Image (cartoon, helix red, strand yellow):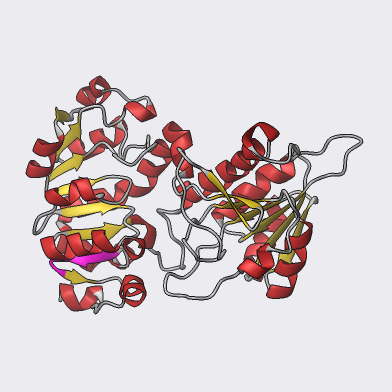
Amino acid sequence: MIIGIPKEIKSQEYRVAVTPLGVKEFKKHHHTVLVEADAGIGSSITDQDYRAAGAEIVDKTQLFERADMIYKVKEMFPEEFKYLRAGLIVFTYIHSNAHREQTDAFLESRAVGIAYEDIQDGKGNFPLLRPMSEIAGKGGFLAACQFIQKIHGGTGMMPARVYGVTTPEIMVIGAGYAGIGAAELASAFGNKVTLLDISFDKLEQAKAILPPNVELLYSNSSNIAQYLTQSDVVINCVLWPKWKKDHLVTRNMIRTMKRGALIVDVSCDDGGAIETCRSTSHDHPVYFEEGIMHYCVDNIPSAFSRTATYALTGATLPYALEIADKGCKQALLDNPALRKGLSFYLGELTLAETGKKQNRSYKSPEEVLN
């Protein structure tokens, strides 16, 4: 199979889908790898690094015309829709529910789309979200440290324990990989940290690895409402179901927060878990709503691009190799985890969440593959 690695075109996106070591793995399996010129430069990987690993450096048009599978990081943007064609496999973070035009483009072109974020193993885990979630959670706390500074429009409070000063309170919603990452750094800085989740199993796991200055609470409306009013920083790490119309934190609840408090929404679901959140970029990362600063950058890991690229390759490469080795259809039939990531297949929408949110008809992956 011919694998195409394009340069990401999203503003301030510096990750690339695969490292030179990943290219070597494809070559061991006798596949051809095309890499767009300068695709890795944002992660400090040169074209020469890719050539040395066995890749061919090409321009964007040639890459899309020749490739059987496009292996990338972010969703397809309007400038890239023209490259979609029947049978082309696109393996990336797609987030189709949030991008109606992209959904139209995939369906009209009859391309195949497999979304990293929806691949789910038999234990209910999302293995291709895990590495980026940890980086996003830790990066979210580091963003709080930056944007709460007075020079960036914040109150000037340092989110750390300082002698003679009241210790800041940090609220983290969700004890998944992102939440644990955020709580790990926040607690290491000496803050009073409250971590909430609906899963007692996750809270028990968190207790085993986090220090005593992290309070572990069941996530319910009462606890959320109480801790919102006293927290200096709120970090949301809950991936809200795409079809839900309600919110975990409503606008009215936001109005009860301290003046000068900061919300970091790692999940970045527009109008999702937090009603007032909408996705922002590294170019324009923050805005104020109801007097509260919001940081909702939807690609936090890009700021730590080299770490993120190497972590992402480790997670996605086994699935990409399986697709390349077996062919798309057989890989999907053989691997139920991979099959859950199927969003589009030859003109059919196969992701129920997108169908529900966009009010479209859809079929199950099993229906279109058999």
The residue located at (13%, 64%) in the rendering is 108
- Left or right, 61 with respect to 356, comes to left
> Residue 29's image quarter?
top left
Q: Residue 179, percent across and down?
A: 60, 54
- Left or right, 354 with respect to 107, comes to right
Q: Is residue 292 above or below residue 121?
A: above
Q: Residue 367, percent across and down?
A: 19, 79
Quick one: 109 or 338, which is closer to the camera?
109
Which secondary structure type mostly characterizes the magenta part of the structure? Answer: strand
The magenta-colored residue range is: 342-347
Q: Is residue 11 visible?
A: yes
Report the residue that reaches farthest toward the top.
48
Q: Quadrant of the C terminus?
A: bottom left
- Left or right, 12 with respect to 323, comes to right
Q: Residue 363, percent across and down?
A: 23, 78
Q: Residue 192, percent across and down?
A: 79, 50
Q: Is residue 285 above or below residue 331?
A: above
Q: Is residue 96 above or below residue 286?
A: below
The residue located at (84%, 35%) in the rendering is 162
The residue located at (26%, 49%) in the rendering is 77
- Left or right, 214 with respect to 115, comes to right
Q: Is residue 330 visible?
A: no
> Residue 185's image quarter?
top right
> Residue 346's image quarter?
bottom left
Q: Is residue 298 above or below residue 151?
A: below
